[in-house]
Image (cartoon, rainbow, N blue to C red):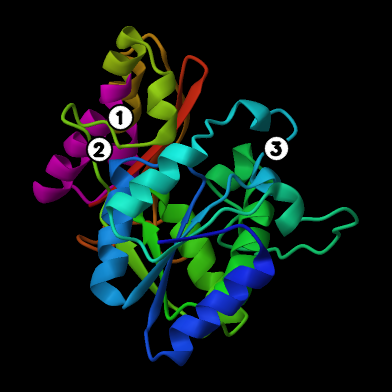
């Protein structure tokens, strides 16, 4: 497995993969790799002949009130993780390699990124789209593999790729949950035992919503009210949003359409921010 730290070397190696006739898949991560990332890598390996994993905590995705310095960083463990999964190349650029002194160019998406997380984290998706645009330009993958847990990011990046004519297919790996139902995420390690118990309310609320949809409930307001009430029963949970939206546009839906409707939510568990979602 190749460990690459410079943009130029990554660009050259990706070109070598293509020159040898291999298709290339890119998996983007913030590092601190876990079982959810393993699922992304497996999806990438099923879709392409060479897999590149980018391990890059993106400073542009963090707002002024979010402590980027405290984001977990485990580069040595991440490299070992990728090696054990037989990844072809790991790209670990330093922040100054991706965004050197004097950097001043940004890519913004002005519609899909505005609701949901875009309200509470107004600068987040500008950082996301800028970083994705750079990684797509550097690696030029045939396939980009994203995770369903980040449903709004998936929609934003799809729009970015379509609008800017990147020649990359997007594949979405299913959301991976731990045994207690909590969606696997880096921030889970910050939860205490009690906080973890309350975090289980997110997946339980989504399950209740899916049951209501299966029983024929088509009113978004009714389902949102039930989910919000369920979350409110837990002392440590503070709801940021609960929304029923079109999974492509992130616009609110007037009626639940089975299989084509996304219930997305975000909540604070004390000081830990978690997101989750389910298709109704």
Q: Residue at x 32, y 77 (%)?
A: 48
Q: Residue furthest left?
A: 215
Q: Secondary structure at mark 1?
A: helix
Q: Which residues are magenta?
A: 199-226
Q: Quadrant of the N terminus?
A: bottom left
Q: Is residue 39 visible?
A: yes
Tell me: residue 54, above or below residue 238: below
Q: Residue at x 35, y 45 (%)?
A: 81
Residue 30 is labelled as: none
Quadrant for residue 169, please give it. bottom left
Crowd class of label 1 (few under 14; some 14 to 19; many from 20; radius 10 Å): many
Do labels 1 and 2 touch, CB within 8 Å? yes
Label 3 to label 2: alpha-carbon separation? 28 Å
Crowd class of label 3 (few under 14; some 14 to 19; many from 20; radius 10 Å): some
Q: Residue at x 53, y 62 (%)?
A: 156
Label 1 to label 2: alpha-carbon separation? 6 Å
Tell me: residue 123, above or below residue 53: above
Residue 234, image x, y percentages: 33, 13
Tell me: residue 209, above or below residue 132: above
Q: Is residue 215 magenta?
A: yes
Residue 117, image x, y percentages: 55, 43
The mark nearer the N terminus, 3 or 2, is: 3
Label 3 to label 1: alpha-carbon separation? 24 Å
Q: Which residue is mark 1?
A: 202
Q: Nearer the viewer, residue 184 or 237?
A: 184
Secondary structure mostly taken by the magenta-highlighted segment of the chain: helix
Residue 206 is labelled as: 2
Q: Which residue is mark 3?
A: 63
Q: Nearer the viewer, residue 170 or 137?
A: 137
Which mark is nearer the camera, 3 or 1? Answer: 3
Q: Nearer the viewer, residue 210 or 212?
A: 210
């Amino acid at each position: 497995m190749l460990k690459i730290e410079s943009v130029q070397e990554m660009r050259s190696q990706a070109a070598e993969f293509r020159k040898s006739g291999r298709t290339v898949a890119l998996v983007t991560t913030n590092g601190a790799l876990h079982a959810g990332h393993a699922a992304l890598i497996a999806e990438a390996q099923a879709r392409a002949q060479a897999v590149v994993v980018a391990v890059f905590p993106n400073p542009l995705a963090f707002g002024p009130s979010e402590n980027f310095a405290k984001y977990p960083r485990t580069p040595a463990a991440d490299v070992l993780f990728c090696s054990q999964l037989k990844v072809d190349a790991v790209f670990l650029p330093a922040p100054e390699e991706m965004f050197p002194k004097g950097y001043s160019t940004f890519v913004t998406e002005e519609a899909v990124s505005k609701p949901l997380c875009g309200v509470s984290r107004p600068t987040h998706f500008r950082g996301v789209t800028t970083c994705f645009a750079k990684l797509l330009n550097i690696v030029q993958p045939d396939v980009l593999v994203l995770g369903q847990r980040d449903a709004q990011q998936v929609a934003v990046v799809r729009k970015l790729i379509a609008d800017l004519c990147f020649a990359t297919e997007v594949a979405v790996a299913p959301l991976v949950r731990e045994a207690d139902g909590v969606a696997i995420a880096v921030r889970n390690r910050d939860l205490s035992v009690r906080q973890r118990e309350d975090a289980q309310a997110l997946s339980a609320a989504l399950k209740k919503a899916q049951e209501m949809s299966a029983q024929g409930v088509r009113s978004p307001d009714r389902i949102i009210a039930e989910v919000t009430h369920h979350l409110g029963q837990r002392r440590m949970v503070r709801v940021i949003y609960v929304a029923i939206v079109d999974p492509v546009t992130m616009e609110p839906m007037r009626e639940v359409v089975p299989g084509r409707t996304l219930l997305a939510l975000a909540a604070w568990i004390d000081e830990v921010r978690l997101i989750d979602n389910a298709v109704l």
